[in-house]
Image: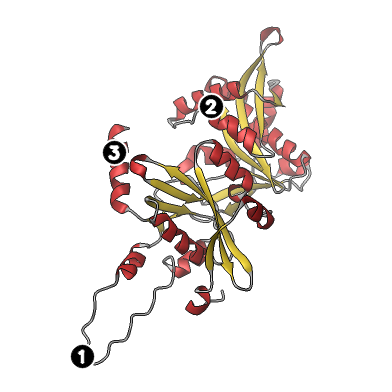
Amino acid sequence: MHRRNIASIKTMTLVKLTENEYGKISENAPLWQSLSWKAYQESIGRKTRIYGLKTSNLGISTYALVTIDKTTFGLSVWDIPRGPVGPDSSELISQIVDEAKKEKCMALYFSGETEALIDQANCCSPRPSPPRRTSGEVASRRSPTANARRKQKIKKSDRHEQPEETLVIDLKKSEEEILSQMKQKGRYNIRVAEKNNIQVDKSSDVDSFYDLLSKTSGRDGFKIKPKSHYEKFLGCVPGSFLLVAKRIADRGSRIAIAGLIGAIHNATGYYYYGASDYEHRNLMAPYLLQWEAMKYCKAQDCNKYDLLGIGSHWAGVTEFKMKFGGEVQSCGKERMIVIRPVSKWILETKRKILG
């Protein structure tokens, strides 16, 4: 990788971009760095910023959509999901940290393909060389700026919101080829659901999905967001969709037993939220639901279907997803820079005590 010298880095300027400016340069950005994601985050109460790194001869070289989650005491957490995007990520992160310090930010999280650049930098920005001492001059203490930079070490994230790996299905293949590359158990479970007359349809019935999600959270022990959160996802993210699997009961009535919320962005389909009724687990509806989602995305001219996250922290979900075959791809490790360690520790301790 070409290493820039300090002089060239100093020519880079941090700028705030308008939506119109950002729209012109972010057409190929990941879903989480898109304008539609910005609208979605704002709809659920988060603040957003769009920062760019402007160079004298190249215009905007690197950019980042930042979401800001306010906490108590006026503190906040800043997040750059699957970003920044561009070759000068380490310098952009350094300058965003400087902005975050002004606004009581406890920590900045980021992830994606910036990992290699960040690992080489090992900190946000180059440290200035210490001034030379003349004869008889006493060594001075480390300057406040140097101390601040020393503390801005990049650490492994202390949360598990952005996975390090994902599983991607190639939708350019025929349906027969997609099925054949699945694990035998995955194909078998799809056939079980079909034999049990499970029907999957595109739906707008968020109520049924939320009921299923409530059952899933109670079973698996995770917290869910208010129903409005999922309604806003479907309303703000272009290409989003809801599929519901139903069992045909006596007298022809249909009972929702599984649901899936996904999105399509830049010719990729994403599996985002899923829920199911454990009472009907033997019908294997979630397997048919995923297969129908793949076929739906393929019909919308998608090239890939992203099952969105696997790893040891999601062992059961990972086992389920791996049955669909596909290729394991890296997402880049989520990292963090702790800006106010004491405030972060106090707030986290308070949350643990109060539950």
Query: Closest to the observer: 147 or 307?
Result: 147
Distance of mark 1 from mark 2, alpha carbons? 70 Å
* Residue at the spot of label 2: 227
> What secondary structure is found at the residue carrying circle 3?
helix
The residue under the point 71% across, 10% down is 252
Asked if the residue under mark 3 is in contact with the one under mark 1, i.e. CB atoms within 8 Å, the reply is: no
Q: Amino acid at mark 1?
A: Gly
Q: Nearer the viewer, mark 1 or mark 3?
A: 1
* Residue at the spot of label 3: 350
* Residue at the spot of label 1: 136
Q: Position of residue 82 (x, y in %)?
A: 55, 52
Which circle's residue, 1 or 2, is located before the other in the chain? 1
Distance of mark 2 from mark 3, alpha carbons? 26 Å
In the image, residue 301 sits, relative to residue 98, either above or below, namely: above
- Quarter placement of the C terminus: top left
Q: Nearer the viewer, mark 1 or mark 2?
A: 1
Coloration of the structure image: secondary structure
> What secondary structure is found at the residue carrying circle 2?
helix
The residue under the point 28% across, 44% down is 346
One can see residue 319 in this view: no
Q: For mark 3, does the 10 Å Cα neighbourhood hold few (<14), some (14 to 19), or many (20 or more) residues?
A: few
Q: Position of residue 207 (x, y in %)?
A: 59, 21
